[in-house]
Image (cartoon, grey):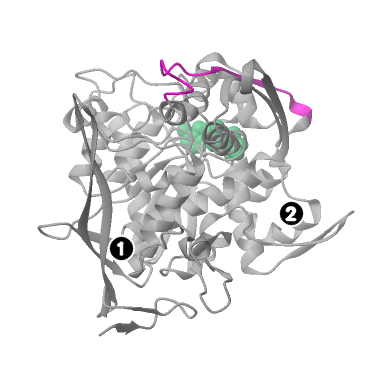
Amino acid sequence: MSNQVNGISKRLIVESSNVKLVDGVLESKFNYRKNHFEHRADGLHVTPKEHEYSFKTVLKPRKTGLLLVGLGGNNGSTAVGSIYANQYGMTWRTKEGSNQANYFGSVTQTATVHLGYDSATQNQIFVPFKDIVPILSPNDLVISGWDISNSNLYDAMARAKVFEPELQEKLRPFMEPIVPLPSVYYPDFIASNQGDRANNVIPGSNKLEHLEHIRADIRKFKQDHELECVIVLWTANTERYTDVRSGLNTTADEILKSIGSNEDEVSPSNIFAVASILEGAHYINGSPQNTLVPGIIELADRHNVFVGGDDFKSGQTKFKSAFVDFLVSSGLKPECIVSYNHLGNNDGKNLSEARQFRSKEISKSSVVDDMVKSNQILFPDAKNPDHCVVIKYVPFVADSKRAMDEYICSIFMGGKQTFVVHNTCEDSLLASPLIYDLAILTELASRVTYKVSDDYKPFHSVLSILSLLLKAPVVPPGTPISNAFMRQFSTLTKLVTALAGFPSDTDMQIEFFTQ
Ligand code: NAI
């Protein structure tokens, strides 16, 4: 007999014996079909097996606060302003006509998921991602945060040059009263050209005191707004890499000790990550630097909080992670990828110094690795294509970043195929929806536990389901990194449908070619 579970959403009712609703908790069973492999002398042995997973999902989203490090930056001010614009249904005129606030670019708010084919009409059935299991809307998020610049968010928004003037004026009453909290500033970690911005800095040079200050900020925010879940997200300037070495930050105890002894190599983002974890707040790194050192990951595990990173996958790299997958899946061999950018916002200014550029170069370059490894016919020696990343600072274009990519592939019979892609876009209009998605998916993950054989437990502290939104995903030690966009999307949609009690349709369309 099947159970009918109402209340997953208004529009979706799951009829399945694999799911039941008990006291606001959705309990679902999921048969995970997985092939097991053995490399033997006579070849590769494949054994298909099924593993039963049980999930429990607390249905009601928690009251969630999002603390942005870099609140007064282009992303920070755009992310906050866009929420007010959506909450109040704002419209504004441009010379092309009237615009209305929306959440385009947010997977959780605007993507749909293919559930299968309706056998009566043969129509494909798609449902909004947000209707499969209950999730927050960005409008529900309580937002605050820190910045080393004391500009209020109206001035920050004007400085960012992202929104049209009419929208800026409509947002003014909401944005002007918001002034970022003072932050931790260690000049050695971001570009020296940022110094004139740093007028909102926690005094002193004692890193333990800085840690306690940030912890107190998080506690106060949580209490003031009676929050059940707090997420701290770094969208501040790209830092240089920190050293990773034994004695400094390779264990939880080491990083705590290094803060206590005021080690130079402890970065501001390390302080924020540790403060968040110690306060039970999840921590996400939207920039490329290596904040999530092994000691911080161990600390997150110890305190049962999630960490995720690195670097928003917003424009050029997002396209690359879909396009290179498409090329390799088509049997074409990318030989050379040259990615050139110029941008004129403060991010570009910061990246114009070598050590900060290097952080970005690393995160932008790793994105094709898994696709190269996927095809030994095209890449018999697993050597990556030549991959060159250039970023130039050109103030005039402000946030309207230009990304130009050339892809050259080897094709049939020694031919060459060259693709040239030109992408122009306000960078922060791409990044802000990812900020919401990272927070919304993290909050969802905090309501889920799973069981394979023994007791229910939460997901791994390194929340790799966020990979879709990140250029250089940090994953649990020893697990593979997936960069290909559609595979990442499918991981996420398969997870939410499994939580809802109906595994994704096999989508083989067998009924159409066996009729
Ligand atoms: P931005 O430079 O406009 O904003 C960064 C803000 O962080 C500034 O207001 C700055 O004053 C502040 N800041 C610097 N150090 C700080 C600290 N220690 N504590 C608190 N605040 C601090 O940059 P934008 O465009 O908002 O980008 C933010 C970050 O996101 C950058 O690291 C960028 O590389 C990364 N990113 C942006 C993407 C996009 O905009 N599409 C895509 C991928 C990553």
Ligand 1 lies under 8 Å from the Cβ of mark 1: no
Residue 304, percent from left and from top: 22, 49
Residue 411, percent from left and from top: 62, 23
Residue 193, percent from left and from top: 60, 21
Q: CA distance from mark 1 to mark 2?
A: 36 Å
Q: Say which residue appears at 18% left-offset and 43% top-offset.
A: 302
Which residues are drawn in magenta?
Answer: 376-396
Q: How packed is label 1: few (under 14 Cα within 10 Å), some, or many (20 or more)? A: some
In magenta stretch: residue 490: no
Residue designated by label 2 = 168
Residue 254, percent from left and from top: 19, 26
Front-lying residue, 382 or 200: 382
- The quadrant in which residue 26 appears is bottom left
Front-lying residue, 145 or 414: 414
Ligand 1 lies under 8 Å from the Cβ of mark 2: no
Residue 385 can be seen, yes or no: yes
Of the residues shown, which amino acid type is indicated by label 2?
Answer: Gln
Quick one: SS at disc 1?
loop
In magenta stretch: residue 392: yes
Residue designated by label 1 = 447
Left or right? Give the position of 274 relative to 401: left
Question: If the picture is divided into quarters, which one holds ligand 1?
Answer: top right
Residue 151 can be seen, yes or no: no
